Image (cartoon, grey):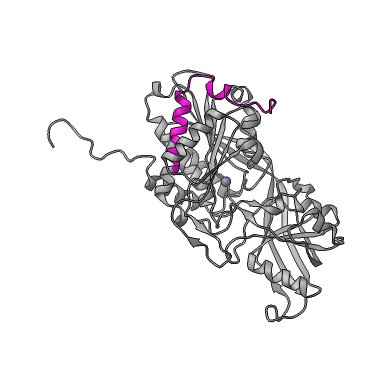
Amino acid sequence: MFGGTAPAFAAADPLGGDLLHRDVRDLCAFGPRRTGTDAEHGASAWVAERLRAAGLEVRLDPYPFRQWRLTGWDVELVAGTASAEVAAFPRTVATHPIWNTRPAAGEADLVYVGSGTQKELDRHDLRGKAVLVDGKVLLNVFATYNADGYVYWNAAARGAVAMFATSDAPGNLVRMIGMGRNELDANPIPAFTVGRKDFGMMRRASHAGTARIRYRLDATHVDGVTHDVVATLPGSRTGKDGIVACAHTDSMFDGALDDATGIAGLIGLAHHFAARPRHRRPKPMTFLAVTGHDTGFPHLGVRHWIEANAAQVATLSGFCSLDHLAGIAAEDLGGDRPVRRGGDEERLLLISDNALLYGLTAQVAVKHRLFPSIPAPEPLARANPDLEGMFVERGVPSVNMTMAYPWYHTPQDTPDKIPPTQLARSTRAYRDILEAMQRMPSGWLRRAETSPRKR
Ligand SMILES: [Zn+2]
């Protein structure tokens, strides 16, 4: 040692890929974090502990909600024309209930309705039938059967008794997809997503003649409790002009990309900003972990926090949603396994109608090689009406730089598919946006926001 003192070890960089990835693994170790379950409560307590370790003031804010409790299900093709593919009946089908359906059991003829447009539905008498809905899941997230007036609701209105929709995921993986509108106990019929291979088998069976499906879904809606984790970091100025960063703790399966990556980023950023001298972070910051985005949609998300903090929301400088920060790039070409390729997945820059924030986000995306990136104004995309959408509605400049790979919302969304270096790039991009929000004079970003009323 040459004079002076040196630390025994350099402090680990909280935005380094290895630490971020460790948090992804630790959170996924809780298993599926369905809102209101013990696993979710444990995961939320763990997030609170990690944010406390960063030096923030943290509280768990419990609140009641209507919880969906799934205990079991099965679906079988019970009759049809025997073929090389299905020589004997019944034949079990790889499915998952669409999470917001209520309990049901029954048997019905299967009717293939293509992609389920109004015209296609009009061609059939759907009364007492189970509908089979085809489609694509665009960018691995947006199901076409959710686009045209939500096929689920149109089919139910025409008297269908059950819906089966393609997962459009690799091989026979079953993907969880919601239906946009969720009336909880009042949802009229059971609905399932189906592995793509089994979906093809059902489609061929329905074309060959009469095919019948038997289904059973054991699930109830009960009164549950969930928590927001609210961590605050005071600025050198008090009160107004705060900044919020947010990720969601809940998941249907292991949820590595969605959204352990966002929670890991949130923890890393909390460490980063807590370590900065207070005069370099004048605006108060809130680091928020919410639930009920994947397993409570669209009733939870940030709703509870927003309603409890209306005065603060009215003066917020900005909001960042950390949702799906990193994952290996792969192309699903219809086979059993996606083809891996270099670079990143296409990203969607979901952003409020704000030229200043657009410029900033584009610069940051290029700097950290977060491309290809597709700018999508949030007021048009309305991708997450329970997250950034709620802030945009209230005039808060908001951004979510998101992406999804072919394993999104399947049991295969696991930590081994999250590249630590990409996770670090993505988290640093948010660091730069949050730092720019800190530096901007009070009110600037908010004045650049096109208010929803002026649109
Ligand atoms: Zn998510």
**In front of the other: 284 or 403:** 403
Look at the picture and state if 288 lies above or below 201: above
Per the image, is 71 magenta? Answer: no
Q: Image quadrant of residue 272?
A: top left
Q: Is residue 49 left or right of residue 214?
A: left
Q: Main secondary structure of the magenta part?
A: helix
The quarter of the picture where residue 215 lies is bottom right
Depth check, front residue: 437 or 56: 437
Instruction: Give how far across and how far down residue 317 sits, in percent.
Output: 54, 25
Above or below for 115 versus 258:
below
The answer to whether residue 382 shows anywhere in this view is no
Question: In which quadrant is the N terminus drawn?
Answer: top left
Q: Is residue 444 magenta?
A: yes
Residue 339 horizontal/vertical position (percent): 50, 62
The magenta span reads 426-455
- Quadrant, the C terminus: top right
